[in-house]
Image: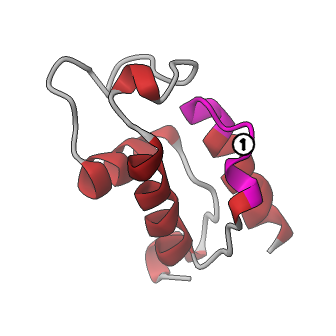
Amino acid sequence: MSDAHATAPELTVEDLTGIMRSSAGEDESVDLDGDILDSAFADLGYDSLALLETVARISRDYGVELGDDVLDGVETPRDLLTAVNRSLTAA
């Protein structure tokens, strides 16, 4: 786990949007700084490949193993935050 995340092993929505932007870019018609928690990733311009890239980056940056099962049922940023933070807590 990197020093930046050693004291607070929790992924925030701000962390997630930053990772989404750096991993898969940002659709110009979508404001990731708005209320996106319950928006479908597809509506935010993120397909399954972009989501996989985002999850791979989270795994690497936060030092947590996120298996394929983490993505089962993940349709929104809130779903992903819940799954990731559950994995971080268990780690």
- Residue designated by label 1: 82
Question: SS at mark 1?
Answer: helix
Residue 90 among those drawn in magenta: no
- 69 relative position to 64: left or right: right
Q: In percent of the image, x 79 and y 75: which residue is there?
A: 91
Q: Could you tell me which quadrant the N terminus lies in?
A: bottom right
Residue 81, position as x, y percentages in the image: 63, 43
In the displayed structure, 6 sits above or below 33; it is below
Residue 79, position as x, y percentages in the image: 67, 35
In the displayed structure, 13 sits above or below 15; it is above
Per the rendered image, the range of residues in magenta is 69-79
Residue 2, position as x, y percentages in the image: 48, 82
Q: In percent of the image, x 47 and y 81: which residue is there?
A: 3
Q: Amino acid at mark 1?
A: Thr
Residue 78 among those drawn in magenta: yes
Q: In percent of the image, x 49 and y 67: which residue is there?
A: 56
Q: In percent of the image, x 41 and y 38: which residue is there?
A: 47
Tag count: 1
Neighbour class for label 1 at 10 Å: few (<14), some, many (≥20)?
Answer: some
Determine the image quadrant of residue 72.
Answer: top right
